[in-house]
Image: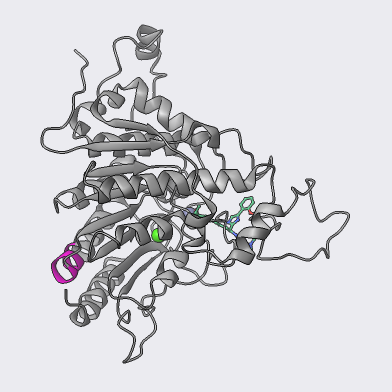
Amino acid sequence: EYNITRPKGYTVSYHFNPDMEPHHFGLTHPMKPFRLTLTKSLVTAYGMNFAMDNYNTRIATYEELNSFHTSDYLDYLHMAPPEEMPRDIDNPDKEVKFNLGGSDCPLFHGLYDYCSMSAGSSLDAARKICNKQSDIAIAWGGGLHHAKKSEASGFCYINDIVIAILQLLRCYPRVLYIDIDVHHGDGVEEAFHSTDRVLTCSFHKFAPEVFFPGTGGLDDNGPKSEHNPGAHHAINVPLNDGITDEQYGHLFQSVIGKINEKFRPSVIALQCGADSLAGDRLGRFNLQVQGHGACAKFCKTFGIPMIMFGGGGYTPRNVARAWAYETSVAIDVDEKINKIIPEHTPWRKHFVQEELFPSLEQILGEPRANRNSQKRLQEIIQHVHEQLRFVNA
Ligand code: ZLV
Ligand code: CA
Ligand code: ZN
């Protein structure tokens, strides 16, 4: 019997804008907005929508984007014409302004609208948390952690996370930002370098010169100046290829558990970039849906409000599985979700017989060699715990 009901005692909200999907970064670009629709479809197929408040979100206004980004950048983003693709063949020396129009951050048709929709979803989620209408707010269309105040970077143009956290800071004293995307959350870290009201913690593949963006070493803990209250409030967990669920889970719990103890956040902003999953087109880790989702599960045990953002994720069917599973964690049905296939699913019988319906247990491509030694992981935990001696709520 398949029946998902609302969790008792708290409210989950799902913030989605169906108009993000038709946007295209270009044929060969790894970022595929249709993964958001794929996720929503899987969530709905499982009946999880009945356990949440569902919002079709509005677009963020210019003023809202302006709370973090500069006017000259926003004006250019708004006015720059879409470039013909493929670019650079006729005109390789064309000036690139604000890092817009390269192959990472192409100028595509409807770009400004797309960015406003992503930020609008995240900001709506933050507002629901602020006015206590929601305890866990989900915005898979956000999580674009590389964007700087005057610059696009790594597929990110508008930093919806920073804009959402600025909103949270109006209502809560301390925000803990956690980033499990395989890339370093450099844009969010930098935006809050000079405040002790936001502590950022990113887990990522770290290999300067080789892996984007190349920042986020173990010793990068924010500008160390006596007069900077934000010093020590950036925590980085640099990792190598092939990390497993077990190692990641242990690391996550000891690092985030300690941060929670010392920093005492009033709210959590969790970026759930799904490119840390095994089999991701750009990623390097060996995480399963369960290991990825265990991070959200652990954060939930703190019993404080939480926003869950999307982020990277370049093997769309795995992104949908991970974010659907994490939605199930938010609404507390994760025990069931691995087993159930909704009774009313068309052709259910055939899917079950032929094992075509994806169970969450069978994602994955070729496993990568694990280059993370227990010794190194222990050193990382040690360093982080020492770093946290400087952090007091
Ligand atoms: O998942 O890109 O390596 C959040 C996120 O964290 C680079 N970019 C930069 C530095 C020099 N370039 C190379 C330019 C590549 C341009 C096109 C690709 C095209 C096809 C396949 C892969 C890539 C690619 N680009 C792989 N890695 C990059 C990174 C940017 C990664 C951004 C991650 C974003 C949404
Ligand atoms: Ca990360
Ligand atoms: Zn990423």
Look at the image and say whether residue 299 sits in the magenta stretch.
no
The way the protein has been coloured in the rendering is one colour
Q: Where is residue 238 in the image (x, y as percent from the top left)?
A: 38, 68
Position above or below: 218 against 108:
below
Position above or below: 359 against 233:
above
Viewer-side residue, 313 vs 120: 120
Q: Position of residue 277 (x, y in %)?
A: 40, 46
Position above or below: 105 against 24:
below
Q: In which quarter of the image is residue 369?
A: bottom left
Viewer-side residue, 157 vs 57: 57
Q: Is residue 362 visible?
A: no
Q: Position of residue 347 (x, y in %)?
A: 41, 7
Q: Can residue 307 be seen in this view?
A: yes
Q: Residue furthest front?
A: 63
Magenta range is 257-263
Q: Position of residue 87 (x, y in %)?
A: 79, 52
Q: Is residue 262 left or right of residue 18?
A: left
Q: Residue at the spot x=21%, y=52% of the render?
A: 299
